[in-house]
């Protein structure tokens, strides 16, 4: 009941903003009309001329800013979707500012209540005023009794009901807009809102951010080039996060980089290297790597901060993305198109020959150019335009990755204009290609494919038998009779088994030739095992054929 009340209040407030900027018709078309006060439009009637002096997109941006943090965040996310939104709209969305007032709170009392601790047992100092204030939370400096300097991120009071109410309104409005505007339906605005809801809920959970930091730290535990802030689990929960305070300077501070005796070119290469590792190796990457979120310590280590929003690539997505990069480096456009087809959420290319020519032109533009001669962001924009014109839609995480690479490129351009992204990526691709050619990996992948193949195909005779039984029992409209089906079924099963045996034998031969340890009588033990299993299966097949 409380959430409904909150929603009603929010709708009434937002309806006023919408009416103020001349968009009240959107609410009136949907289920939210009942929440609009009757006098709301009349209230702003004397300002119609002033409002109409602004462009359509300016009015949308101004309305979003007045609606509050949730809508601003949504607008900022949409500003990355140049594949679906007009350029003029994108320009306005990029102007969105999250100017949030400082919320006065008693930090010590908050920690006492939330964590159930005596603050004095853990902290020697806690600053009363926040060092940073955002829409979701505020950050305070503090010092532990053990001497470590820390920062405490505290979620704003009653933020969840506001977020839930705003998200409910946005989802309702998105559905309404799709009903009346085909262009928004083609944009899949409802899916975009759902994706935003997932992202925002992740940011609302500070436990999620804590786990992100731990996962990120584990991914780079053996890499001395990077430092991940220490988190204090006993001093954290879903609304409070206590972590190490990083003392250093922004990664774009070239003057201080030189002062500590490091070449800016090296920092640029290392930063790009680390980001490539995040998505190519781990499939888990920082979603917002702007200069304010990346620092350099005095010892030269690079530090990423703010892990509230992270991008994730599923193993299949990561493999397809790697394939796409490899094919682009080889200029194999046909393979690129096949990969894009598998990677895309929506692929409705009307003219593949035209699409092929456009991709090849893009590759030629990228090839052997340095950041001094080419703007990677511009390349991404060209790619987005090509994808948009050809009705290709990718997952939200892919767009997050593109945005992240663009931000890293901006840092690289600042520190080293001659940095060549293509050259940096080639060693990664060569290493990945070699790993894929490893006999063990080939064997594992082969076994996996055989299992999938056999699972799918071995069920086919049974499925066919069921279908034919239904036909024979006159359970379908037409009755057919196939003579000799049992013989066909047995022959088909033996064929599949023969294929599996042959594949297993070939895989075992590869292992034996590669001398993969452990060895038995000088021959790979895994290879011998494979020969033994394929032999048993072969004998079994032979005996069945005699029956």
Image (tube, rainbow, N blue to C red):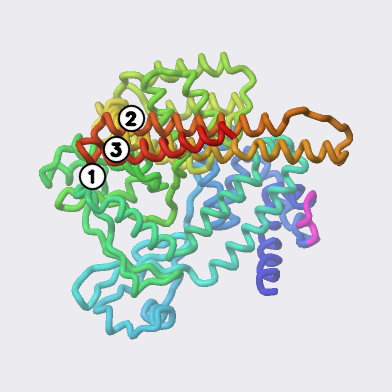
In the image, taking residue 511 as reference, residue 497 lies left or right, namely: right
Looking at this view, name the residue that lies furthest to the front.
Answer: 546
Magenta stretch: give its range: 29-34
Which of 332/293 is in front? Answer: 332
Q: Report which residue position mark 2 lands on.
A: 509
- Could you tell me how far apart the alpha carbons at marks 1 and 3 are, in whole angstroms? 16 Å
Question: Neighbour class for label 1 at 10 Å: few (<14), some, many (≥20)?
Answer: some
Q: Can the viewer see residue 479?
A: yes
Q: Report which residue position mark 3 lands on.
A: 272
Q: Is residue 31 magenta?
A: yes
Which residue is located at x 52 percent, y 25 percent? 338
| Image depth: mark 3 or mark 2 in front | 2
- Could you tell me how far apart the alpha carbons at marks 3 and 2 are, in whole angstroms? 41 Å
Quadrant where the N terminus sits is bottom right
Tell me the tag on residue 253.
1
Q: Are marks 2 and 1 in contact (CB under 8 Å)?
A: no
Question: Neighbour class for label 2 at 10 Å: few (<14), some, many (≥20)?
Answer: some
In the image, taking residue 169 as reference, residue 417 lies left or right, namely: left
Which residue is located at x 28 percent, y 84 percent? 120
Circle nearer the N terminus (3, 2): 3
Q: Quadrant of residue 227?
A: bottom left
- Could you tell me how far apart the alpha carbons at marks 2 and 1 are, in whole angstroms? 56 Å
């Amino acid at each position: 009941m409380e959430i409904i009340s909150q929603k009603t209040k929010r709708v009434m407030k937002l309806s006023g903003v919408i009416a103020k900027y001349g968009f009240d018709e959107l609410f009136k078309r949907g289920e939210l009309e009942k929440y609009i006060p009757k006098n709301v439009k009349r209230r702003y009637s004397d300002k119609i001329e002033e409002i109409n002096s602004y462009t359509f997109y300016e009015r949308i941006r101004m309305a979003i800013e007045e609606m509050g943090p949730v809508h601003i965040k949504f607008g900022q996310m949409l500003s990355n979707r140049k594949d679906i939104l007009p350029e003029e709209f994108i320009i306005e969305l990029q102007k969105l500012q999250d100017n949030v007032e400082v919320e006065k709170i008693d930090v010590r009392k908050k920690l006492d209540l939330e964590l159930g601790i005596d603050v004095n047992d853990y902290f020697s100092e806690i600053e009363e005023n926040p060092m940073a204030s955002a829409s979701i939370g505020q950050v305070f400096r503090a010092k532990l009794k053990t001497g470590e300097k820390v920062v405490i991120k505290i979620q704003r009071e009653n933020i969840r009901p506001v977020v839930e109410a705003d998200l409910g309104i946005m989802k309702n409005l998105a559905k309404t807009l799709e009903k009346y505007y085909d262009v928004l339906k083609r944009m899949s605005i409802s899916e975009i809102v759902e994706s935003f809801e997932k992202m925002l809920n992740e940011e609302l959970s500070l436990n999620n951010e804590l786990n992100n930091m731990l996962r990120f730290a584990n991914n780079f535990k053996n890499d001395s080039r990077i430092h991940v802030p220490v988190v204090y689990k006993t001093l954290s929960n879903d609304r409070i996060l206590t972590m190490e305070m990083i003392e250093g300077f922004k990664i774009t501070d070239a003057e201080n980089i030189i002062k500590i005796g490091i070449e800016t070119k090296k920092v640029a290469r290392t930063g790009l290297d680390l980001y490539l590792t995040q998505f190519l190796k781990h499939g888990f990457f920082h979603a917002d790597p702007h200069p304010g979120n990346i620092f350099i310590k005095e010892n030269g280590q690079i530090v990423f901060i703010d892990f509230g929003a992270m991008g994730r690539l599923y193993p299949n997505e990561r493999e397809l993305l790697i394939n796409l990069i490899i094919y682009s480096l080889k200029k194999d456009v046909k393979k690129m198109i096949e990969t894009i087809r598998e990677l895309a959420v929506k692929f409705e290319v009307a003219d593949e020959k035209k699409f092929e020519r456009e991709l090849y032109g893009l590759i030629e533009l990228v090839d052997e150019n340095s950041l001094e001669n080419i703007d990677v962001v511009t390349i991404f924009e060209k790619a987005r335009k090509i994808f948009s014109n050809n009705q290709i839609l990718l997952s939200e995480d892919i767009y997050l990755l593109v945005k992240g690479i663009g931000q890293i490129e901006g840092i690289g351009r600042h520190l080293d204009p001659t940095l060549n992204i293509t050259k940096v990526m080639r060693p990664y691709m060569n290493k990945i290609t070699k790993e894929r050619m490893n006999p063990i990996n080939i064997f594992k992948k082969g076994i996996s494919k055989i299992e999938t193949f056999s699972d799918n195909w071995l069920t086919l005779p049974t499925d066919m038998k069921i279908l034919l039984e239904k036909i024979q029992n006159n359970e379908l409209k037409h009755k057919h009779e196939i003579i000799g089906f049992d013989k066909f079924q047995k022959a088909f099963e033996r064929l599949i088994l023969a294929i599996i045996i042959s594949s297993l034998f070939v895989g075992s031969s590869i292992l034996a030739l590669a001398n993969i340890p452990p060895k038995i009588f000088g021959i790979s033990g895994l290879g011998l095992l494979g020969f033994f299993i394929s032999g048993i299966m072969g004998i079994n097949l032979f005996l069945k054929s005699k029956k």
